Image (cartoon, helix red, strand yellow):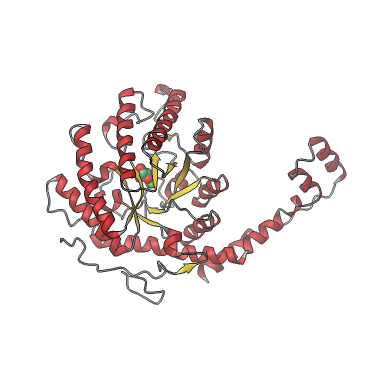
């Protein structure tokens, strides 16, 4: 049997004293944190498109990466090698889940039938490898944005033939996701948006997007797919304006079209920052609305305004993300999917290991810090006190719906001494630092 990554035998937990760059210092899968093991809390997943299919190309240059299948020329042989290599990688990294787009697995053919046949060949291999290794599918999806046919969108294309083609692809991707026991199915609206309103019927596009999602849910239920549906917001890129802009816009869309019971949200950190929000903000909006489903764990660059999809290493972001996720009672059946790619200059296979180790350790550290912070109750006590005016007197009456503007005006006219208290932001930041850095 071919070994694709001979430079690594196994990545294991060695603890914080270790200086071995091919070991975990924080991620200890069986270590119990609160009520679950780290493995159960974090539900790490590998993104097939970045780790196997990604070539390191960008707008200014072609692919740069060196991969163990570079000696092969037949696209189907390459696809097979990637499938075997992916499971070797996940096993060596102790990553229990993966995610893919249909055409990450195999090359597109000249016809849709040929494309499906290519994908089916690889799905058979993956099914066997899943059974052998116990590695599971976190989510499946269909790539409805890469090929030129999707230049004007997929479900929101002005061309009904494209809508039909996209439906055929999602139908097949749902069948594959079910066949592989996928726990979720993701819709990321790659080109579901517009470049200019001068040529766009926004009302029809949004209605069609909703029609498409209703059809997908109906078909999935018909074939007995019991997994969770997720929408992944992103404000822009590749389109100027994407309809699933952020969690709040998706929430409004789902309610407008009667889809709110069928969908949760897959939040990507880099998409949050592109929308002008923090990662924690998006997680919070989803959590308090009961629709936090899964996470694409990555980070952007503070100085660049685009989707750089870097591996997450920022401990503030991972701690505050885990702070939301723990309060959500976890993510299952969702998980933490590394929708992240190595930099173009990190072109060697071993860089894939370093990158995933960095992300897994950053989230494991964040989990431990967030758990301790929550156990202490320091932030929650402060917040409870800050809002305590709503627990008695006029505040309690507001919350209970016992007063209107007339009663409130009468109260305010008699209350000439409004007393505020400090928000203590800097004190709270000190507390947070204490839990992150000890
Ligand atoms: C692109 C998206 C995409 C989705 C899946 O920016 O992150 O990769 O996660 O289609
Ligand atoms: Ca993503
Ligand atoms: Ca992204």
Quadrant, the N terminus? bottom left
Q: Residue at x 22, y 47 (%)?
A: 124
Q: Nearer the viewer, residue 23 or 92?
A: 92
**Residue occupying the far bottom of the picture:** 17
**In the picture provided, is 280 more to the left or to the right than 107?**
right
Q: Nearer the viewer, residue 377 or 126?
A: 126
**Where's residue 291, x and y in %?**
51, 45
Q: x, y (%) of residue 221?
A: 40, 37
Q: Nearer the viewer, residue 116 or 54?
A: 116
In screen coordinates, is 398 left or right of 355?
A: right
Residue at image coords 53%, 64%? 371
Which residue is found at the position 40% from the left and 69% from the top? 28
- Figure check: 22 above or below 116: below
Q: Is residue 338 visible?
A: yes
Side of 402 relative to 139 (left or right)? right
Res 423 visible? no
User: Where residue 396 appears, x then y in whole percent?
Assistant: 77, 48
Q: Quadrant of residue 156?
A: top left
Which residue occupies 38% across, 60% down? 359
């Amino acid at each position: 049997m071919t070994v694709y990554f001979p430079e690594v035998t196994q990545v294991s937990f060695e603890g914080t004293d270790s200086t071995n760059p091919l070991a975990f210092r924080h991620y200890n899968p069986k270590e119990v944190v609160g009520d679950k093991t780290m493995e159960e809390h974090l539900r790490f997943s590998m993104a097939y498109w970045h780790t196997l299919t990604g070539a390191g190309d960008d707008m200014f240059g072609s692919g740069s990466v060196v991969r163990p299948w570079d000696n092969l020329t037949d696209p189907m042989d390459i696809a097979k090698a990637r499938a075997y290599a992916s499971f070797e990688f996940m096993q060596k990294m102790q990553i229990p889940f993966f995610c893919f787009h249909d055409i990450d697995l195999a090359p597109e053919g000249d016809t849709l039938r040929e494309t499906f046949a290519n994908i089916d060949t690889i799905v058979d291999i993956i099914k066997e490898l899943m059974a052998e290794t116990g590695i599971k599918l976190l989510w499946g999806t269909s790539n409805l944005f890469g090929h030129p046919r999707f230049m004007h969108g997929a479900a929101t294309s002005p061309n009904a033939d494209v809508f039909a083609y996209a439906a055929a692809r999602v139908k097949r991707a749902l069948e594959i996701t079910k066949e592989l026991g996928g726990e979720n199915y993701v819709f990321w609206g790659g080109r579901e948006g517009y470049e200019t309103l001068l040529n766009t019927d926004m009302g029809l596009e949004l209605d069609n997007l909703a029609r498409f999602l209703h059809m997908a849910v109906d078909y999935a239920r018909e074939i007995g797919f019991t997994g969770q549906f997720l929408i992944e917001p992103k404000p822009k890129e590749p389109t100027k304006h994407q309809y699933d802009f952020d969690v709040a816009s998706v929430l409004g869309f789902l309610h407008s079209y009667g889809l709110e019971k069928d969908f949760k949200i897959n939040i990507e950190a880099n998409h949050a920052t592109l929308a002008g929000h923090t990662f924690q903000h998006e997680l919070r909006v989803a959590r308090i609305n009961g629709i936090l489903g899964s996470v694409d764990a990555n980070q952007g660059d503070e100085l660049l305004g685009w989707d750089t999809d870097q591996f997450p290493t920022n401990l503030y972001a991972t701690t505050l993300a885990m702070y939301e996720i723990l309060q959500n009672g976890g993510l299952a059946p969702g998980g933490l999917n590394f929708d992240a790619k190595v930099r173009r200059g990190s072109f060697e296979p071993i860089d894939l290991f370093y990158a995933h180790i960095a992300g897994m350790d950053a989230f494991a550290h964040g989990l431990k810090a967030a758990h301790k912070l929550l156990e202490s109750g320091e932030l929650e006590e402060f917040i409870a006190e800050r809002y305590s005016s709503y627990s008695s007197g006029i505040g309690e009456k507001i919350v209970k719906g016992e007063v209107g503007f007339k009663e409130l005006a009468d109260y305010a006219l008699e209350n000439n001494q409004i007393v505020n208290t400090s928000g203590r932001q800097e004190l709270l930041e000190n507390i947070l630092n204490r839990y992150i850095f000890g």
